[in-house]
Image (cartoon, rainbow, N blue to C red):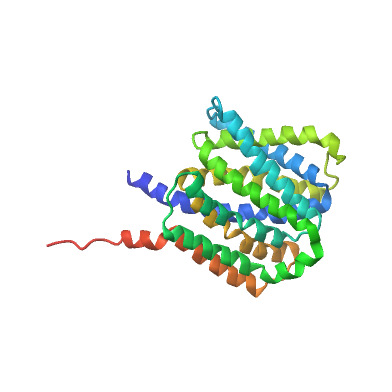
Amino acid sequence: MRSTAGLDRWTVPLLSVLFVPLWASGFIAGKIATQHMEVPTVLLWRFVIAAVAMGAVAVLTRPALPRGSAWAHLAVTALLLQVGQFSAVYSGLANGVPAGLSSLILGMAPLLVGLLTPLLLSTKLGPAPVFGLVIGAAGVYVVLSDELGASVGGIGGSVVFPVLGMLSLTAGTLYQKKFNEDTPVVTTVIVQMLTSLVVTVVAMPFLGAAWLPTDTGGWAAVGWLGVFNSAGAFALMFLLLRMRSTVHVSSLLNLVPATTALVAVPVLGEALTVQAVVGLGIALVGMYVGLGLVRRRRRREPEPVSG
């Protein structure tokens, strides 16, 4: 009993620590991938590799299949979380939107998810989660505030792409939480990847894009996107949604823009700004408040033992 309780206590923090960098890596690898190939090609191989990776896991674990309307709900979630979000984000990256600015705009999704949760999921929120989400959103803005002002003028209307991706992420997260809670995580991910793959394959002949990456850098980028950012990050996301709540995942997503800015320093050669460091600190405070860690620590204080 004690070992199980100890495992449960450490599971969520461990998954949360893994989730943030995996999710943030999608902006870095996505930027690299769109420099080597067209957006439909990136999407195609992202879904192919993710489907194969999760298919191998499914063979080993043999999860239960969806039942009845669950198939349709998974398909809708795939269109929102996979096709809608990433086709928009990659289109923005391919049209000159910086990876940092994309992560900043996508970072607004947690605030929308947190504020819409009580309305759409009949979940009551106390003041702490809302306050934490607002603090986290402020940290998101601080991270790349200088880049936001300098970049919008150069990218023009292309900024609409990450905005659309943010709306798809918000809708998909809420839809996943409401309708796909009872479906095994492995089943959820593989059905979504296969659905997205079918949609992409059907659309490919009409988009005029190449079917294969043409160099090693392109294959490496889509390989990372497929295995780690698709299969890995979304499996963690769905596990956290099941074990905690949309507020928990939203608080973690608040850390993504700052994490993206930090990772971009060694990988993309971008300069580390003061805003990135300050914003990361603010986002951490927002996550701490939003998850109610202060209150939990107080509850765990040992009671005095009577004589």
Q: Which residue corresponds to the image point at 66% horizontal and 36% vertical from the top-left?
A: 193
Q: Is residue 239 left or right of residue 3?
A: right
- Residue drawn at the location 65% of the way across and 50% of the way down: 167
Furthest-front residue in this view? 119
**Position of 56 relative to 120 (above/below):** above
User: Residue at left 60%, top 64%?
Assistant: 140
The residue that appears at 75% across and 50% down in the rendered structure is 90
Q: Quadrant of the N terminus?
A: top left
Percent coordinates x, y for residue 63 in the rendering: 53, 30
Whether residue 99 is situated above or below residue 225 in the rendered picture: below
- The answer to whether one can see residue 300 in this image is no
Q: Which quadrant of the figure has residue 172?
A: top right
Image label count: 0
Which image quadrant is residue 259 in? Answer: bottom right
Residue 298 locus on image (x, y percent)? 33, 62
The C terminus is located in which quarter? bottom left
In terms of image quadrants, where is residue 158?
Answer: bottom right
Q: Residue furthest top?
A: 68
Q: Position of residue 19 (x, y in %)?
A: 57, 52
Task: Determine the residue located farthest toward the left in the rendered image.
Answer: 307
Q: Nearer the viewer, residue 149 or 14?
A: 149
> Is residue 4 in view?
yes
Q: Nearer the viewer, residue 144 or 49?
A: 144
Q: Residue 185: x and y, percent?
A: 54, 37
